[in-house]
Each structure stands twice: as C-alpha cells, then as structure tokens.
Amino acid sequence: MSRKAFITGANKGIGYETARQLAARGMTVLVGARDAELGQAAVDKLRADGADAHFVQIDVSDEESVNAAAARIEAEFGGLDVLVNNAAITGGMEGDGKASSGTLATLRRVYETNVFGLFAVTNALLPLLRRSESARIVNVSSEVGSLSLRTDPNNPMSQMVSAIPYTSSKTAVSMVTVLYAMELRDTAIKVNAANPGYTATDLNGNSGFRTVEQGAEPSVHLATLPADGPSGTFWGYLWGGEQEYGPIPW
C-alpha cells in the first residue's frame, strides 16, 4: 500500500510541485486547497501525469474546515504518513515595508494562516500520523525568519527590509517545529522545517530566482527521510553557500 501525503496549499506553486514530486515517488497525494475548482483542476493535472491524487478541501485558517478535512482523510484513507504544512500568505507590502509601517490587521491575518493554521492542521492530523510506522511532518518555513541570519552583519539577510507579519510568522514556525519535534522525539514521527529559498511563485510576484521544482526539493527531501534521519531541524537551500542544501541556522 502506498504512503499517503497531505499537502496544504497544493493547488499551485511549491505546494503543487511538492505533490507532483511525491507522487512521482509512488505516494498517494492529497491536494489541500481552499478553492474547490482550483484544487480539482490541480488534481486532474496530476492524474493526467499518472499520479494517484485526490482533492481535499481545506481552509487552514478555519478550524471547522480543518476538522472536516481531517475527518474526511480518516474516513476515506484510514491514516496519513506525510503532512506538508505548505499553505502561507505574505500579507503584502505595507508602506515602505519597514517594521513600523505594518498594521495589526495584516499581522493577525498572516498569523491565522501561517502559524495558527499550521498548528490547527498538525493537531487535527496528528492522531492519523501516529498510526503510521514512519510519519513525517514538514513545515515550510523561510530563511527570512532566521534570527541568526537576520542579525549577522556579514549575511545579506541582515540588510533586507522585511515586513513583520510574514517574516516573524516564519520565525514562529521554527519554534512550533522544535516543540513538536521535542514532543514526538520518542516516536517514529520526524518533524522538520524546510527552506525552499527565494522561489518564483505568486507569493512574491514570481520574482524569485529559484524554480518551483527547486523550491519543492527541500520539502520532498524531508518528507522522505529514512528512519535514521534528523528531527527538529531547519534544512534547505543555502543562499550563497558552498553547498546547495544543508542545515539553516535558527
């Protein structure tokens, strides 16, 4: 029986490509998306390429929707082996993008999806993941939320102007990842954060220098870790590093 992977925000961009790559590795992929039409279109495209793909409607910022998705996955698939928390929003650029230019409304909206939504989805699906012999949880994060990189004067990240909502939400994702990894360290479940790097998607107006195929690679790697793989790590694209991929400092 094939392993089952659920990817949120999987109707396009990195989420869709993550589903495609996992399907190419023989997994059954459950495509999570808010919009039923877009989600089903993504599934149809995946199936046309031979994937075992299924649409699961979910709005990660709506607890009722999250619980309904979890109930459907349990009823139709009986369990889950991989969860990729990919869904995220930026909140856009407010004013000049500096910390003092943001609004509380945007901060709340971004956290509802990027942090609270991730938390809700993970908790709702954790009972199903516990049934797996080797479950994997991947939280898609970003290097822009690394405290180490942002405070290192020798790193280009320290010069980057970033709005508080998106950037700090990814810092929060780091701690969420660590705490779940600590709770589950005596189980077969591995929990890690992925850094796609600056990938061209709708999230950034397709301004990134990495392709979605490249951006999905860290998530796919962490979703397919062997039994002796790490847990509680931040791993992915190393901007300007000697190696393309490796551990990212928190």
Image (cartoon, rainbow, N blue to C red):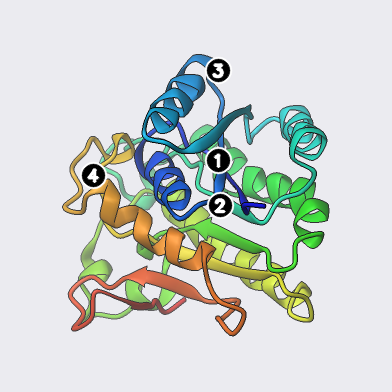
Q: Secondary structure at mark 1?
A: loop
Question: Where in the figure is residue 187, as x and y percent of width and height?
Answer: 78, 76
Q: What residue do we see at 23% from left, 44% from top?
A: 200
Give SS at disc 2.
Answer: strand
Residue 7 appears in the picture as rendered: no
Q: Earlier in the sequence, mark 2 or mark 1?
A: 1
User: Residue 197 placed where, x, y %?
Assistant: 30, 60
The residue that mark 4 highlights is 200
Mark-to-mark CA distance, 3 and 2 = 19 Å
Distance from Cα at disc 4 to Cα at disc 2: 19 Å
> Which residue corresponds to the image point at 76% horizontal and 73% vertical from the top-left?
184
Pointer 4 with pointer 2, Cβ within 8 A? no
Q: Nearer the viewer, residue 106 or 193?
A: 193
Q: Which residue is mark 2?
A: 84
Tag 4's secondary structure?
loop
Toward which corner of the image does residue 194 lie, by quadrant? bottom left
Crowd class of label 2 (few under 14; some 14 to 19; many from 20; radius 10 Å): many
Dot 3 or dot 2: first in sequence order is 3
Q: Amino acid at mark 1?
A: Thr
Q: Mark 4 or mark 3: name the one nearer the start of the chain.
A: 3
* Any part of residue 124 in sight: yes
Q: CA separation, marks 4 and 3?
A: 24 Å
Looking at the image, is mark 4 or mark 3 nearer the viewer? 3
Report the amino acid beneath label 2.
Answer: Val
Amino acid at dot 4: Ala
Which numbered dot is residue 8?
1
Point out the tag, 1 or 3, that comes first from the N-terminus. Answer: 1
Who is closer to the viewer here, 27 or 55? 27
- Alpha carbon separation for disc pair 1 and 3: 13 Å
Q: Which residue does the image show at 72% across and 32% down from the upper left?
A: 69
Tell me, yes or no, whether the two marked residues, 1 and 3, touch with CB atoms within 8 Å.
no
